[in-house]
Image (cartoon, rainbow, N blue to C red):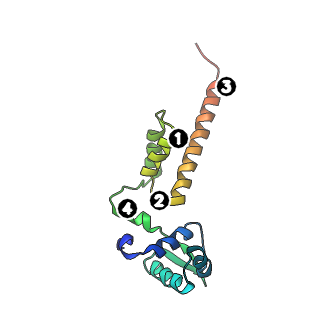
Amino acid sequence: MADPKEQFDEIHWNIVDVLREGRATPSYLSERVGESRQLVSQRLRDLRLSGYVEKVHKGLYELVEDPEDDMESSGGKEEISNVDEAIATIKEITKDESGDDERRGQLRDELPGSGDLLDRRVDAILSMYDLLREEGEAKKRRSPRCC
């Protein structure tokens, strides 16, 4: 696909931002981005033809691929391709005693995606990490000491 930065204008990106939140109708998108319904429909057509947006029902659209993900992967960013690799990356990032803000930044750099979706991924990983760490510490306190 062509570089989305070159083919899309601000209206395209505003529509993508709204669609990141979930499915929407042209009327709703028009209201949210502050443009005419006709202009929004034209931009939706562009996004649909580019493969980023899909018409899931009459008058209902959803984002199926984020154009920013394409820009990141086309820029040479290596995506995590399997679970083992993802776990290794998370272990590497979380093994030191850096603060949550630093970990959050490292995870954002390593994980594919962007925007709210990426933020939710990072939050989920850090929450799971904290939960597992607390569970491990609790097990250590409960286990009998030997020798």
Q: Earlier in the sequence, mark 2 or mark 1?
A: 1
Q: Helix or strand or loop: what does disc 4 sit on? A: helix
Residue name at image x 52 percent, y 40 percent: 100
Residue pointed to by mark 3: 142
Residue corresponding to mark 2: 113
Which x, y percent locates residue 16? 51, 71
Q: Position of residue 141 (x, y in %)?
A: 64, 24
Which of labels 4 and 3 is toward the front? 4
Q: Which mark is residue 100?
A: 1
Q: What residue appears at the point 36 percent right and 56 percent down from the top-left corner?
A: 77
Earlier-in-chain disc, 1 versus 4: 4
Residue 86 versus residue 58: which sits nearer the camera? 58
**Do residues under tags 4 and 3 come within 8 Å of each other at their CB atoms?**
no
Q: Which residue is mark 4?
A: 73
Disc 1 residue crowd, few under 14, some 14–19, many 20+, Cα 10 Å:
few
Question: Mark 2 and mark 4 in contact (Cβ < 8 Å)?
Answer: no
Question: Which of pointers 4 and 3 lies earlier in the amino acid sequence?
Answer: 4
Type of residue at label 4?
Answer: Ser
Label 1 vs label 3: CA separation?
A: 27 Å
Q: Do callouts 1 and 4 mark residues in contact (Cβ within 8 Å)?
A: no
CA–CA distance between discs 4 and 2? 9 Å
Q: Amino acid at mark 2?
A: Gly
Q: Report which quarter residue 76 is drawn in.
A: bottom left
Please name the residue shown 55% across and 74% down the image. Answer: 33
Which of disc 2 and disc 3 is earlier in sequence? 2
Q: Characterize the local packing of mark 2: few (<14), some (14-19) or many (20 or more) Cα atoms within 10 angstroms.
A: many
Q: Residue furthest toward the bottom? A: 38
